[in-house]
Amino acid sequence: MKSVEEIKAAIESAVPGAAVEVVPNPGPAAQHSLRIAPEHAIDIAQFLRDDPELALDFLSNVTGVDWPDKEIAEKVKVTREVKKMVDGPDGKVEQTVQETVDETRKRVEPGCLEVVFHLYSIAKTHGPLVIRMRTKNRSDQVELPSVTPIWRSAEFQEREVFDLYGIVFTGHPDLRRILMWDEFKDYPMRKDYVEPDDFEYEPTPHDEVLKRAQKHKGREQQTGIRDQERVAE
Amino acid sequence: MLGEGILKGMAETARNFFGSYVSKERLTTVEYPEERVPTAENARVFPFLVYDGAEWEAGMRCVACQICEKECPPKCILIDKSKDKKPDYAGKPQFYPTRFDIDISVCMSCQICVEVCPFEAIKMDTQFELATDDRFAGLLLDRKELAKSNEYYHTIHPTEATEVDSRLAEEKAKVEAKAKAAAEAAAAKAAAAPNPAPPADKPPAGGGD
Amino acid sequence: MDQQLKIELGKQGVFVTTIEELYNWGRRSSVWPMQFGLACCAIEMIATTMARYDMARFGAEVFRPSPRQADLMIVSGTVTKKMAPQVVRLYNQMAEPRYVIAMGACAISGGPFKQGYNVLKGIDRYIPVDVHIPGCPPRPEALLQAFITLQKKIDGQHLTGEDRPRFLDPNAQGEFSVPDQGEHDLEPTSNTGVWPVPITIR
């Protein structure tokens, strides 16, 4: 199979205006991926499947990634005008001077959700090619185009990504939860998911589990009655 | 021929059925609980704590390092470390566990606790007849229930146990040799060095006036 | 009548019994399980029904597909929170006398997947379980030993008196509430009438 850079060039020539960038993988596997923009995703996917040289006809895996919001603290040199008491001829005098200080500025880089595809070719027996697509943010702009019209195996896998991460795939024939029940509200694989409180009986708790289990034990110790009697009240 | 598949299947069943009256190997049923399938040597069910000697509390090899507690994937081990120390097989004072609970309703027999234990203190048992109707106390084994002797370990995993014993004996020999060498060096040093305490009747150098 | 005398008479060809013993003997020698396997422990359960560890020797001859005709539900495998209401519904549809064996770590307590977002930490939170078999998965012989334990339990059940089993007590609870699938978890997280959580000694 062609290298990732060559595939990027092929995509750019076949789909004009497509924004593709190479995401290098620093590990020993060196499996670099291509990040594509959602706008031309369907056209790019069509090209990847129908191109006689690439012939990537098998979508093996669709998975999601949650990039949480990152707080970045950077040191910036700021020049400000400050009123200071300076030694003058008749004692201290107020004067305006320029002062340069180091200020730590904190900003929040917004996170996003990403979907990762692994493509193989059964006709040419090569692969995998890894494609990534990012949403605009994690809260309200979480739509991405669905590739189910091109690779049928995406149907269930995109349902799983929708269920666990919350990415809405537009154009999907039947987008509903697949692992959790329909009334479930959370997205379990997100980094900020908190497990529900079913730690009533933890006989060997330590570390994280101990913190959660202590809420139940603490109640018993405070009131002196067991959980089951408490519910009957 | 119509029905050929069915006849082939029936022939197979008939061969097994009538054959079981003739040859022993076709009669595959092992009538538990009267007969048992012989367990392989490296069979494993749940962990147990090994102790040397006759007394389980004094001879327990576990030093409460809590590595198995941290490495257990479903976190089914709970250890409380003692405040004082007691001597181990090589004579070195070590902590010991005042509480060692294993929740066998969670244990998945992965043997990771055995692999990471640096003191050969926890090994895998082969007893599987642990069905109970007591959900809470019957499935939480404390250290008394978990403690089993080294002799028992030899009966269930003979090659492994002899290998562990030889390794521990080697370690003990090394420690003893080191201690002996240190004692000899200290004794030699004391004999070679001049007597530091001055004799009582020696007049003080430079009288004090 | 004491056991020794009974055995002696039995050797002579005279069998003495009580109605209770006969009744319980009939019940325990023909416990029909339901076809109910969820995950890997189901494979061990199937292995127990096959030739080497034959469960039919103990009377569990046929695995009934319908809960109405089954006596025993062997919950074998991880019970997910999505499946839990269905398990409780099936248990409600079984006719008394009915028994439950929780086979394997997952059915007892969630097992190795206890921290999972969709794993119910033990089916005994919603239905009463008679025998628990620890193991991941338990050996077929362990399932047979649990079956023998269940048979002993059935043998010990009295037909009259204070401690008679659920099916002979008209005031006992026959239907167990099915949990709702709420927005974040099953509601309630456990059926407190069924699951007596002890105060953890910690």
Image (cartoon, coloured by chain):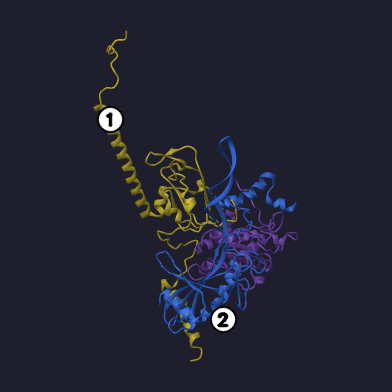
Chain colours: A blue, B yellow, C purple
User: Where's residue A131, x and y in %?
Assistant: 49, 73
Residue at point 56%, 53% (across, down): A105
**Chain letter belonging to callout 2:** A
User: Where's residue A50, x and y in %?
Assistant: 48, 84
Instruction: Name the residue tied to disc 2.
Output: A149
Q: Is residue C161 visible?
A: yes
Q: The disc labelled 2 sits on which kind of residue?
A: Pro
Depth check, mark 1 against mark 2: the one in front is 2
Structural distance between the alpha carbons of marks 1 and 2:
87 Å
Name the residue nearer the viewer: B165 or C170.
B165
> Mark on residue A204?
none
- Mark 2 lies on a secondary structure that is loop
Q: How many neighbours does mark 1 have within 10 angstroms: few (below 14), some (14-19), or many (20 or more)?
A: few
User: Where's residue A4, x and y in %?
Assistant: 43, 74
Residue at point 29%, 31% (across, down): B186
**Chain letter belonging to callout 1:** B
Name the residue nearer the viewer: A186 or A48.
A48
> Mark on residue B187?
1
